[in-house]
Image: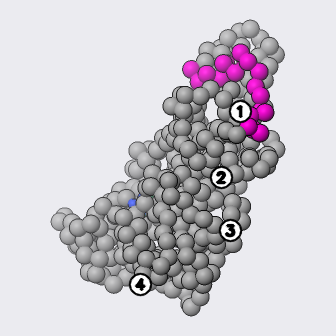
Amino acid sequence: MNLYKNRLCCHFSLVKVFLINPNRLSCRRRSVLSFLLHPIGFCDIFSTSLSIDSIRAKTMRILAIETSCDDTGAAVILNGRKILSNVVSSQVPIHQKYGGVVPELASRRHIEMIVPIVTEALGTAKVTLREIDGIAVTQGPGLIGSLLVGLSFAKSLSFATGLPLVGVNHIEAHLSAIFLEKVTPKFPFIGLVVSGGHTSLFRVDGFGKFRRLGQTRDDAAGEAFDKVAKLLGLGYPGGPIIDELSKRGNPKAIRFPRPSLGKNSFDFSFSGIKTAVVNYVKSHPEALGTHPEELIRDIVSSFQEAVVEVLVKKTIEAAQHERLKRVVLSGGVAANRLLRERVKEQASECKIAVYIPLPSFCTDNAAMVGVAGYEYLKRGIRAPLSLNAFSNMPL
Ligand code: KG4
Ligand code: ZN
């Protein structure tokens, strides 16, 4: 990993030297780098001097970068709310044949995609780097090799341009995605982050003000979706596939467990539900046979029903426990059709308002990183260039 990290630093430090002082490079190296960087418009920044005074101005454009797992994302966000661009390059075709994310392949693909994706984000937003006021980048948690690509790139760019930099926690970014919507919640609220890597409930009192009420003790909900889909040979990522297949299945066909982990516990456990599916398939081998469609639809529909029931129950109980009337869902699993319907139905019975971002803002994207990053940059919070990435980074 150190070797990998060094190589990455080397790569971006060449860019750095060039951006800061192209005269320090020989004519030949300079023209080669100019040629390489020209398509992304970075040479342009030498034509005028950069000013970060606009940071104090009324409008702030943040360039946000997200590479925590298998999506390379870049976005330009105006005043922390308006999306000028939001580009995501998915790696699903690369990882699909392995049934899950292969970390080494993920980081290599980020290296290939980071420059084109940032270029596209700037181009779509119709801005150059001169019109950007700050850079926000996902710092963790996530796959370390993936995180390092975005972080090293953002640091190099910050160093070269003088733009202020801030590191953003990926979980906070998910919770912030709701502020990209027209209707936004007031603080405080209960936030459920439910994705491939996390399943946690928070009391959220403001940006940077979180209290974790519970979290999964084993698998994340999205991980359980992915593993069940893999077991049944349905493909990757499992969540959207199971969501779709479940539409035509019977959710009451099989009663899978709903672990509650005791009264007043806001922790989750999904490995038991997953194991129950494994055991069910072992005792019904025809599920993996030649004509398994109907049985498979019933299995995934019953599995989804169990997961959604637990997520909704705990989220509403957390709101009641904290005496709050607002809940926010976020993370890839919050794109799930049944979860979205069910939480709205049950919350309205308790007069609790539900806020869920559009499905494209639930899954990994850089726009949500821009929302959280803006909140810190506008308060003058800056990350040093020694900023590091962390695979484990609790909120
Ligand atoms: O937030 P995300 O894009 O990445 C992480 O931070 O993990 O979440 C990805 C996870 C995957 O496990 C995927 O299967 C799940 O979200 N997912 C879904 C749906 N769409 C994505 N799970 C259930 N239903 C969906 N419609
Ligand atoms: Zn995520």
Where's residue 55, x and y in %? 75, 38
Q: Is mark 2 within 8 Å of ligand 2?
A: no
State which tag comes first along the sequence, 2 or 3. 3
Q: Tell me the residue at 58%/51% (across/down).
A: 368
Q: Is residue 284 above or below residue 124?
A: below
State which tag comes first along the sequence, 2 or 1. 1
Q: Is mark 1 within 8 Å of ligand 2?
A: no
Question: Which one is in front in this view, the residue at disc 3 or the one at disc 1?
Answer: 3
Question: Which one is in front in this view, the residue at disc 2 or the one at disc 1?
Answer: 2
Answer yes or no: is residue 253 visible: yes
Answer yes or no: is residue 223 visible: no
Pointer 1 residue:
157
Q: Residues within 10 Å of mark 2 (few under 14, many from 20)?
A: many
Q: Is residue 270 above or below residue 105?
A: below
Q: Any mark on residue 257, and which?
A: 4
State which tag comes first along the sequence, 1 or 4. 1
Cα–Cα span, label 4 and label 3: 33 Å
Q: Quadrant of residue 2?
A: top right
